[in-house]
Amino acid sequence: MNQERLMKVLLAPHISEKSLGLGDVSKQFVFRVDRSANKQEVKAAVESMFDVKVNDVRIVNVKGKTKGTAGRNAGRRANWKKAYVALQDGFDIDFMGAE
């Protein structure tokens, strides 16, 4: 796969209570990914960026919320995609840095 494309696949780690719990319990990490990304690209990008071995990738399309003020200005947030990445035993990703 093209190295330039792999650098654009992962947009950011998705930090929430659920994602932090998954990281502690089952070595799964959640990333916000490009909407055109597929499982193979996400796996290759995580392996090359973090020097880990990926066991499984699950991708979820998240629908944007409808927002508005008092029924007047109806708007909608953008749809986005997130990936749940499970690592093989013995590997870990530390977003805070090693201290």
Image (cartoon, rainbow, N blue to C red):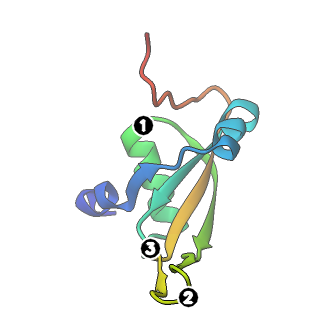
First of labels 2, 3 by sequence position: 3
Q: Amino acid at mark 3?
A: Arg
Q: Amino acid at mark 2?
A: Gly
Instruction: Identify whether 43 is placed above or below 90.
Output: below
| CA–CA distance in space, label 1 to label 2 | 45 Å
Q: Which residue is mark 2?
A: 71
Image coordinates of residue 61 in percent, x first then y, are: 59, 73
Instruction: Identify whether 32 is placed above or below 73.
Output: above
Residue at 27% in and 56% down = 3
Image coordinates of residue 97 in percent, x first then y, are: 42, 21
Image coordinates of residue 83 in percent, x first then y, are: 57, 59
Could you classify mark 3 by the number of other residues whose Cα lies within 10 Å: few (under 14), some (14-19), or many (20 or more)? few
Residue at 45% in and 44% down = 47
Q: Quadrant of the C terminus?
A: top left
| CA–CA distance in space, label 2 to label 3 | 30 Å
| Residue sitting at the far left | 4
First of labels 3, 1 by sequence position: 3
Q: Which mark is in front, 2 or 3?
A: 2
Q: Do residues under tags 1 and 2 come within 8 Å of each other at their CB atoms?
A: no
Disc 1, SS? helix
Q: Which residue is mark 3?
A: 35
Q: Do residues under tags 2 and 3 come within 8 Å of each other at their CB atoms?
A: no
Q: Which residue is mark 1?
A: 50
Disc 3, SS? loop
Answer left or right for 22 relative to 49.
right
Q: Nearer the viewer, residue 47 or 66?
A: 66
